[in-house]
Image (cartoon, rainbow, N blue to C red):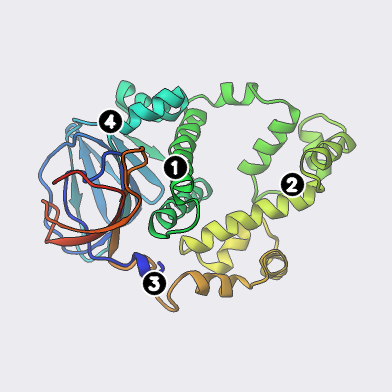
């Protein structure tokens, strides 16, 4: 990970922000946790480790690509089976008050929160492509929190809402696959299929046969909607996924096949033409050279979005039950803790 995100492990179980907080943890040899619950929504995005989670006395073995969502009051604890294997995860906290503010904007924002709470479904597994996309949105959110660019407050608001809405959409389509398909027209169905099958043959002829449509009609739709031919759209989508995979520490030689390129040479040429850098150059610009763990020790970021927040960077010291005293960079005005 970029150097500015390398921080000591954050350990507390209470929130400093009235809105949300974002963490990355990478731990070995930590003290096992007792069963506990929180007053806020807690998301885990599991990246690695030999770990299981017990939720309401039910035990689950975790694997990369798992998202755990724990509503307020749900008892849980983590068990680390091999302390020599790094336990890596993103953790994202949302206060009930912030969820209520989002609900006023649209019920769609809190679909996932309601679904998890009402159906007592706490674990969701995503495929590699979907999980990489989610991680990229987490990276974007952390960037907006850290940097003091023009329009920071607006971009931060958009980034956190985009993440929450994206998670709700993904889970909605997992829970209601047929309904999601039926709501789409021809163009949307083709787009949806492309996004879900980027590793496959997506030629105009094959798509026309699959959707019982005239290939010239599909070509016209893409030209009309996006101003580019279908094959260029597919390449751009594949390259965007490749960028996500590069940021998430996937092997470069495996990325091209995962994203639908027939060989590394064609992937290399397309990537450099699109971004002006080779895949290796792009990766080295974003991460420390030769570092297997891009995230360093971990980071903690939190933000307040509502009008009573001061937009300035804070450094806070705090303690908690997850480990030793830590330091965190925080954006927004914190409650007294």
Q: Which residue is mark 4?
A: 96
Between 302 and 276, the one lying in front of the other is: 302
Dot placed on the residue nearer the N-terminal end, 1 or 2: 1
Asked whether, in this view, residue 278 is left or right of residue 227, the answer is left
Dot placed on the residue nearer the N-terminal end, 4 or 1: 4
> In the rendered view, would you say 275 is above or below 31?
below
Asked whether, in this view, residue 139 is left or right of residue 225, the answer is left
Q: Which residue is mark 3?
A: 292
Dot placed on the residue nearer the N-terminal end, 4 or 2: 4
Within 10 angstroms of label 4, few (less than 14), some, or many (20 or more) residues? some
Kindly identify the residue that appears in the image at 39 percent across and 72 percent down. Answer: 292
Picture coordinates of residue 127 (x, y %)?
49, 45
Q: Which residue is mark 2?
A: 202
The quadrant of the picture occupied by the N terminus is: bottom left
Dot placed on the residue nearer the N-terminal end, 4 or 3: 4
Tag shown at residue 262 = none
Secondary structure beneath label 3:
loop
Are discs 3 and 2 less than 8 Å apart at CB?
no
């Amino acid at each position: 990970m970029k150097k500015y995100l390398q921080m000591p492990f954050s350990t507390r179980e209470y929130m400093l922000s009235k809105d949300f907080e974002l963490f990355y943890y990478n731990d070995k040899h930590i003290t096992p946790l007792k069963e506990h619950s929180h007053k806020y929504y807690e998301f885990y995005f599991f990246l690695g480790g030999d770990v299981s989670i017990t939720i309401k006395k039910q035990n689950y073995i975790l694997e990369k690509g798992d998202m755990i969502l724990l509503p307020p009051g749900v008892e849980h604890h983590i068990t680390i089976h091999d302390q020599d294997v790094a336990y890596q995860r993103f953790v994202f906290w949302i206060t009930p008050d912030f969820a209520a503010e989002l609900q006023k904007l649209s019920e769609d924002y809190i679909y996932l929160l309601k679904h998890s709470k009402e159906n007592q479904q706490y674990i969701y597994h995503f495929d590699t492509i979907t999980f990489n996309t989610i991680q990229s949105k987490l990276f974007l959110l952390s960037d907006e929190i850290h940097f003091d660019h023009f329009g920071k407050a607006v971009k931060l608001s958009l980034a956190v809402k985009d993440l929450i809405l994206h998670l709700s959409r993904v889970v909605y389509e997992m829970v209601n696959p047929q309904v999601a398909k039926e709501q789409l027209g021809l163009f949307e169905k083709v787009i949806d299929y492309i996004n879900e099958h980027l590793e496959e043959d997506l030629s105009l002829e094959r798509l026309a046969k699959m959707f019982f449509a005239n290939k010239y009609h599909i070509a016209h739709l893409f030209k009309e909607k996006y101003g580019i031919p279908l094959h260029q759209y597919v390449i751009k989508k594949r390259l965007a996924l490749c960028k996500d995979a590069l940021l998430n520490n996937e092997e470069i030689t495996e990325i091209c096949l995962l994203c639908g390129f027939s060989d590394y040479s064609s992937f290399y040429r397309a990537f450099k033409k699109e971004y002006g850098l080779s895949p290796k150059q792009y990766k080295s610009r974003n991460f420390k050279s030769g570092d297997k763990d891009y995230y360093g020790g971990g980071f903690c970021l939190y933000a307040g979005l509502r009008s009573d927040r001061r937009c300035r960077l804070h450094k806070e010291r705090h303690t908690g039950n997850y480990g030793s005293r830590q330091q965190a960079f925080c954006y927004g005005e914190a409650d007294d803790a």
